[in-house]
Amino acid sequence: MKKVYLFFFLTLFINTNIFSDDGYRLWLKYDKIKDKKILDSYTSQIKGWIVEGNSPTILVAKEELQKGLNGLLGKKIKELSQIKNNIIIAGVYSQSHYLKNINLSESLVEISNEGFVIKSIKIDSKNVIIITGKSDTGILYGIFHFLRLLQTNSNIKNINIVSSPKIKLRLLNHWDNLNRTVERGYAGFSIWDWHKLPDYISPQYKDYARANASIGINGTVLTNVNANAWVLTHQYLIKVAALANVFRPYGIKVYLTARFSAPIEIGNLKTADPLNEEVKQWWKNKVDEIYKLIPDFGGFLVKANSEGQPGPQNYGRTHVDGANMLAEALEPYGGVVMWRAFVYDSNIKEDRAKQSYNEFKPLDGKFRKNVLIQVKNGPIDFQPREPFHPLFGAMPDTPLMMEFQITQEYLGQGTHLVYLAPLFKECLDSDTYSKGPGSTVAKIIDGSLENHSISGIAGVSNIGTDRNWTGHLFGQANWYAFGRLAWDHNLSSDEIAEEWIRMTISNDNEIVSKIKSIMLKSREDCVNYMTPLGLHHIMGWNHHYGPAPWIKDKHRDDWTSVYYHRADTNGIGFDRTATGSNAVSQYFPEVAEIFSSVEKCPEEYLLWFHHLPWDYKMKSGKTLWEEICYHYYNGVEGVKETIKIWDSLKNKIDNEQYNHVKMLLNIQLKEAIWWRDACVLYFQTFSKRPIPDELEKPEKSLDYYMNLNFPYAPGI
């Protein structure tokens, strides 16, 4: 009887997926390469390794290389003390004992201080692969890139890679509060355990740093833009310093959000007027205190005079006065101010899409050299689709910093599979025509168009305490994509998706092809079932969860849905041409001409710029009403197709990964149908036209959808 029980236990144990992937390792899994031919090729080319130096950064680079090689090649790859055939040599070129007689001047002149060179060469008649650059951080980035090549089963014979980041400041913005809630966070609580810091250092902090360094992110803003002044007290600064100590070897600087009223709230001053001498001195003293604790502190991110946040305008001053006051305090230490351009005023009866431009355009060239203006990708607020922000190109004498949202506040939040690289690329590749054709948004934010000495890009984080970091497995792909595009905005959505799939899920070509097809269409599916043809901001009140195009009569017009879609019996859409708000005039003439013309305006932005009759004839030959209906229904069909493709992967990929995504896709389908039915029924009350006969009719009434309530939706 005991033998039977033992046999049953072993059978159960063997057939249980004990190696299931819970997502914690992200794209840094380093599992043994499955393809024997590729594995044999790598093991023949990598017999050992040498990493020169002993700085904290070099030590973590050495640790990463050893961990990666041992895992991927399935055996211990030895650290050597002398050159042998077929090994890896990594080290800073100017300090290298082994590379001193190798001429790499042509490659090195191409790279920045953070860049790297990976190259197959011969040293003393021995074949070696070198990873070198100008700094320890460059070596770390180079090692991560080399491991990426192995993870994706790339060819490393005769390798010759020269790479540098195109943007200098590549930051995550955490909208994390000191009580560990996360505004617009859908993956649990904040990973920063402020109560236990500085004495307890969670292992997750190091893994966070590893993940960010692997994709070239070099800064993190720890706190919410709706800032709490308490983080600037000594009690919290020593906690911030503890995190900075963990991140420093990985080339990551910490930044903090600065609440403009901090001199009053924690400094016992009676004012926060930026021109007041006591206030100036308070900030200088505070900055001195920060740099004594954190010598490489990056600087401040500021949200001021926006959505109720305090700022210089409270005292009759300008954004220039506020930003420059902080910049002056930071300048001796090399710190920067990232001043957000997301400002609008409900007392100004002006199209909200115009207000940021109106506020900041006249201030061009008046900021100190260590100030960047951080601009959202579009003029409203991280919508599923927006035209690029008109400020890009409009402030040539001021460095503009991109702000993308990685967390999916308006794109299904934590339950929808929406790959955001196409959204990011759509904006980055947009041509502003600010200096003629080819003046893309990407060239503006990387500083190359106007030759700015500093440049930056920020992504609002989607990270939380969920075991897989981002709640949804494919949320990891958006974190990854942001980092890769921050490093090189010329990469395509396709390339980045393939890298992530191969590192995270599988290197099987058929599986890669199927998952990539899902990812590349997912954003368009989402736009279709949420906000097609340029509709925008019709989400739920406050929490932004689910459809609510009927929202009206709130304390400010631009926090309602009806403000944006403007549906009536005559038609739908926001007229931003010369006959309406004239927001098109904020773009350069070549762009304005396209957006102003109903015939030339891309249909994906049509209702963003035009209010059109329900019977307006679309390029497809359908009426506008019919076209809206078909887009909503096509969005749902797109999710059904995704589920069908995902179902075909059962038993071909990790079981836990499969089941996790499968359950979330079922939620996404339900919510896509909810979006479709609620919006079509609501807009039908204005169009007075039937849903096309061939489309299935909604099962529930409009009243049902309008009466749904979500008082505890996450992320508020």
Image (cartoon, grey):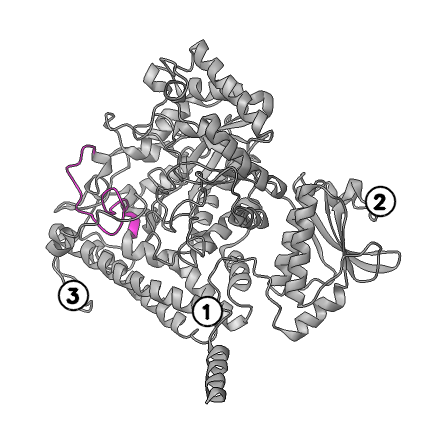
Name which residue lies at 42% across and 64% down.
518
Q: Is residue 705 above or below residue 395?
A: below
Kindly identify the amino acid type of the residue bearing the numbered disc 2: Lys
Furthest residue in direction right, as rendered: 124
Q: Say which amino acid is labelled 3.
A: Lys
Q: Position of residue 159 (x, y in %)?
A: 72, 58
Q: Which residue is mark 3?
A: 697
**Number of marks in the rendered image:** 3
The magenta region covers 532-556
From mark 3 to mark 1, how far is it between C-alphas? Answer: 31 Å
Marked residue nearer the N-terminal end (2 or 1): 2
Residue 433 can be seen in this image: no
Which residue was labeled with disc 1? 514
- Please state which of the two labelled residues, at mark 3 or mark 2, is closer to the viewer: 2
Q: Which residue is mark 2?
A: 100
Numbered label attached to residue 288 = none
In the rendered image, residue 409, in percent from the top left (x then y), is placed at: 34, 47
Q: Quadrant of the C terminus?
A: top left
> Is tag 3's residue or tag 2's residue first in the polypeptide sequence?
2
Up-down: is 313 above or below 581?
above
Disc 3/disc 2 C-alpha distance (Å): 74 Å
Is 442 rendered above or below residue 452?
below
What secondary structure is the magenta-colored segment mainly?
A: loop
